[in-house]
């Protein structure tokens, strides 16, 4: 069984690397151009936004990691969303038998390898896992989503740091319309922190959660 999994890992890694490099170099395998209007428009959008290079970059890095046998669970987790999108494009939009077989085959091999590493993903499959720095009494959703309960000024300042980082990313790196939508999402956790800070200032001094 171990040899079979090793073979599957090597085959998948080679396939991902070749697929990614072929898209960039376009020297051997013909890359689909979209035989149906929806398939063509999606490919055009991916190329226009250059998101296709992000996807192919992920596949290239994941493929190399799989071939050398390093960070295999991480490589599989990074590649699987791209492979699922490829399968959707091939089966539903392009309706190409050949590309559907290729895409579904890649998804199947990746799923098999992920099942073989299921013990590694056990923590992320828990319904309410604890993140780094969390405890049952100090959960992030209580800090950013639940408006009741006092919060000390120092805790509020620390909680603002990731929101400030996200706001800077949205403002400087995203297109204006998308940036405004993303910034609007941050208004709720910001309001929660403000309300909890006010409660903390009005209450007796106590440790923030």
Image: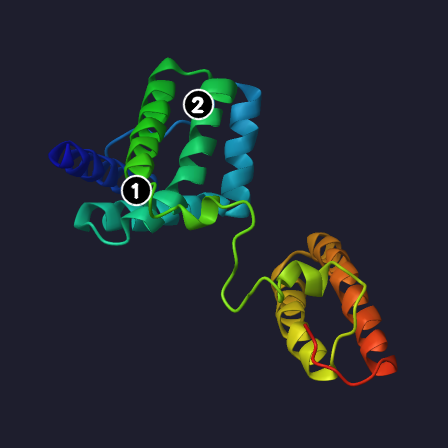
Q: Which of pointers 2 and 1 indicates the residue nearer the eye?
A: 1
Crowding at dot 1, Cα within 10 Å, few <14 / some 14-19 / many 20+, comes out as some
Q: Give how far across and how far down residue 167 sits, in percent.
A: 67, 66
- Separation of marks 2 and 1 at Cα, in angstroms: 27 Å
Residue placed at 34% from the left, 39% from the top? 23
Mark 1 element type: loop
Which residue matches tag 2? 90
Q: Is residue 175 visible?
A: yes
Task: Answer with the quarter of the image where residue 166 lies.
Answer: bottom right
Mark 2 element type: helix
Residue placed at 20% from the left, 49% from the top? 69
Of the pair 149 and 29, the residue shown nearer to us: 149
Q: Is residue 35 visible?
A: no
Of the pair 27 and 111, the residue shown nearer to us: 111
Q: Quadrant of the N terminus?
A: top left
Residue placed at 62% from the left, 67% from the top? 138
On screen, residue 16 above or below 91? below
In this picture, residue 5 sits left or right of residue 44? left
Residue placed at 61% from the left, 65% from the top? 169
Of the pair 73 and 182, the residue shown nearer to us: 73
Which residue matches tag 1? 117
In this picture, residue 195 sits left or right of residue 42? right
């Amino acid at each position: 069984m171990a040899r079979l999994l090793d073979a599957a890992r090597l085959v998948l890694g080679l396939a991902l690397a070749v697929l990614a490099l072929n898209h960039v170099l376009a020297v051997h395998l013909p890359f689909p151009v979209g035989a149906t209007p929806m398939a063509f428009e999606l490919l055009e959008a991916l190329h226009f936004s250059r998101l296709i290079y992000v996807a192919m970059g992920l596949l290239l890095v994941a493929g190399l990691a799989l071939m050398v046998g390093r960070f295999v669970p991480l490589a599989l987790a990074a590649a699987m969303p791209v492979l699922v999108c490829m399968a959707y494009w091939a089966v539903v939009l392009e309706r190409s038998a050949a590309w559907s077989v290729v895409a579904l085959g890649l998804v199947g091999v990746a799923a098999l390898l992920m099942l073989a590493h299921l013990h590694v993903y056990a923590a992320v499959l828990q319904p309410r896992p604890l993140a780094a720095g969390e405890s049952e009494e100090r959960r992030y959703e209580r800090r950013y989503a639940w408006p009741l309960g006092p919060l000390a000024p120092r805790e509020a300042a620390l909680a603002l740091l990731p929101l400030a980082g996200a706001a800077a990313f949205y403002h400087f790196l995203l297109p204006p319309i998308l940036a405004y939508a993303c910034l609007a999402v941050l208004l709720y956790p910001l309001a929660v922190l403000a309300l909890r800070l006010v409660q903390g200032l009005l209450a007796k001094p106590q440790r923030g959660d």
